[in-house]
Amino acid sequence: MAIQFEILETIGVLSSNQKGWQKELNLVSWNERPAKFDLRDWSADHSKMGKGITLSNEEVAALKKLLTEMDV
C-alpha cells in the first residue's frame, strides 16, 4: 500500500541543492490524518521525497523555544 500525502500549506524553504530538491517545512496530511508539521527534502514537483521528520504543534512550540534560546 502506498503512502498517501497532501501538502496543505508550504511554510517555507530552508535550502535547495543542485538537483532541484528543496528542504521544506510544510503542513502535511499523511494517509488522510490530521496535518502535522513536516520537514524533509522534496523533488521540484513533489513527486519524490527524502527522509524527514514530522512534528506535532507541541513539538514545534518546544523546538521554537529551543531555537530562540540558542546563540546562533
Image (spheres, rainbow, N blue to C red):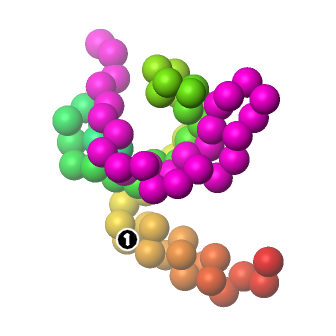
Query: Which quadrant, please, contains the C terminus?
Result: bottom right
Percent position of residue 58, x then y: 37, 71
Percent position of residue 18, x then y: 78, 29
- The image quadrant that residue 7 belongs to is top left
Whether 63 is among the magenta residues is no
Which residue does the image show at 47% across and 27% down from the upper left? Answer: 46
71 with respect to 43 (left or right): right
In this orientation, which residue lies closer to the viewer: 15 or 72? 15
Whether 17 is among the magenta residues is yes
Which residue does the image show at 66% across and 86% down from the upper left? Answer: 69
Q: Name the residue under label 1.
A: 58
Percent position of residue 35, x then y: 28, 49
Percent position of residue 57, x then y: 35, 66
Query: Which quadrant, please, contains the N terminus?
Result: top left
Of the residues shown, which amino acid type is indicated by label 1? Glu
Residue 57 lies, with reference to residue 54, above or below; the image says below
Q: Give the range drawn in magenta.
A: 1-27
In this orientation, which residue lies closer to the viewer: 10 or 1? 10
Which residue does the image show at 22% across and 49% down from the upper left? Answer: 34
35 with respect to 63 (left or right): left
